[in-house]
Image: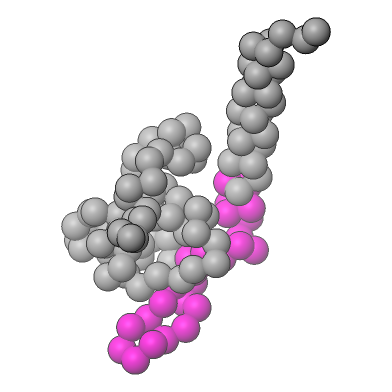
């Protein structure tokens, strides 16, 4: 069985709503994989962006405190999303709210599509 990669999972709500900017895509991979941490090399591979683009944008997010070091494995530094950061909390809340709205609309469609006897 082939492993599913982030870039193969399609558009997330966050990316669909706000676009494909590198910073947003970096935040998105962490939001959609809350139990994982990533090295910068893994992010380059998963996001399909150049090292230069990732490193430039990653540095900004790290300086803002949105992303933080989670651990070191050998020479690799692993990173995770700082879930206590106000921006991360707001983004997570927005994604949840939008998801609920989409689910409610889909539920309404289903109840209208199925005739009640």
Instruction: Name, please, the residue furthest toward the bottom.
Output: 74
- Residue 76, quarter of the rendered image: bottom left
Instruction: Name, please, the residue furthest toward the front.
Output: 117
Report if residue 56 is visible in the image: no
- Please tell me whether residue 62 belongs to the stretch shown in magenta: no
- Please tell me whether residue 71 belongs to the stretch shown in magenta: yes
Coloured how?
one colour
What residue span does the magenta drawing correspond to?
Answer: 66-91
Left or right placement of residue 34 versus residue 1 in this view: right
Q: Quadrant of the N terminus?
A: bottom left
The residue located at (45%, 51%) in the rendering is 28
Residue 23 position (above or below residue 111): below
Q: Find residue 112 and report its horizontal and vertical position in percent.
A: 69, 10
Q: Find residue 4 and report its horizontal and vertical position in percent.
A: 36, 56
Looking at the picture, tell me which residue is in the foreground, 4 or 71: 4
Residue 24 position (above or below residue 85): above
Q: Find residue 108 and report its horizontal and vertical position in percent.
A: 69, 18
- Residue 41, quarter of the rendered image: bottom left
Looking at the picture, tell me which residue is in the foreground, 97 or 84: 97
The residue located at (43%, 66%) in the rendering is 62
Residue 11 position (above or below residue 76): above
State how many labels appear: 0
């Amino acid at each position: 069985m082939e492993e599913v990669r982030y870039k193969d999972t399609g558009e997330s709500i966050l990316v669909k709503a706000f676009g494909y900017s590198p910073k947003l895509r970096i935040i998105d991979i962490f939001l959609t994989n809350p139990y994982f941490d990533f090295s910068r090399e893994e992010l380059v591979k998963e996001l399909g962006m150049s090292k230069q683009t990732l490193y430039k944008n990653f540095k900004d997010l790290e300086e803002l405190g949105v992303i933080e070091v989670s651990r070191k494995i050998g020479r690799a530094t692993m990173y995770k999303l700082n879930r206590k950061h106000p921006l991360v909390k707001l983004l997570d809340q927005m994604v949840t709210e939008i998801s609920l709205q989409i689910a409610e609309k889909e539920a309404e469609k289903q109840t209208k599509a199925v005739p009640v006897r």
